[in-house]
Amino acid sequence: MTVRALLCTCLFFGLALSTSALAQSRDLTQVGHTIVIGTGQDVGDATCFGCSIRVHGHVNGDVTSFGGSVTVDDQAQVDGDITVFGGGIRIDHDVKVAGDVTVFGGQIHRDSTASIGGDVTSFSSGGWILLIFVLPLILFGGFVTLVVWLIRRLLRPAMPAVA
């Protein structure tokens, strides 16, 4: 009976600690739904797959979007990096970004009063998107084709030699 009580107590405290750590991080991740960080709102990282991110408040970490755009509105702040794959970035008046700003396959529109602490990198041609996403798929398809060909060759029945 004491072992069961000890296990239940450990489980309870482990669950309480993990949920409090998750509540403090306040990271936002969405798939297909736009993330809007309101004025006065404070979040950790913001990550979006197939959607866009609008920052009006403060992001303590990084802002990352795959297949969408990122807009950082007037006087908002991002303490980490902003990275966009297949979309654009717009940085408005008096915005502060502590890290790097990088876009693959899109454009960066930056107000002259915006402050960026790191590097600004733009790979605006569509060739980078092909290189990053399509080339690995082609290589993987070639590998699968090779494996299938080898298996068929090994499993092919032997033909007797005709004299």
Image: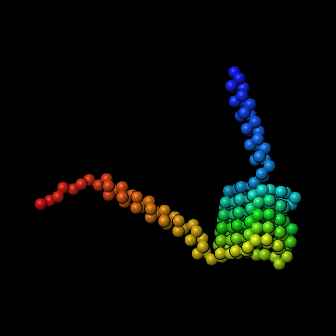
Residue furthest to the left in view is: 163
Query: Where is the C terminus found, in terms of image quarters?
Result: bottom left
State the count of labels: 0
The residue depicted at 70 percent of the width and 67 percent of the height is: 83
Q: Position of residue 146 (x, y in %)?
A: 40, 61
Q: Nearer the viewer, residue 128 or 120?
A: 120
In the foreground, 61 or 140: 61
Place of residue 94 in the rendered image (x, y in percent of width and height, measured from the top left): 86, 72
Q: Is residue 152 above or below residue 69?
A: above
Which residue does the image show at 71% across and 59% down from the upper left? 47
Q: Position of residue 154 (x, y in %)?
A: 32, 55
Answer left or right for 4 relative to 40.
left
| Residue 152 appears left or right of 83 | left
Is any part of residue 70 visible from this angle?
no
Location of residue 38 (image quadrant): bottom right
Answer yes or no: is residue 64 visible: yes
Quadrant in which residue 81 is drawn: bottom right
As drawn, 161 above or below 115: above
**Residue 78: horizontal and vertical position, in percent?**
80, 64
Residue at image position (80%, 56%) is 43
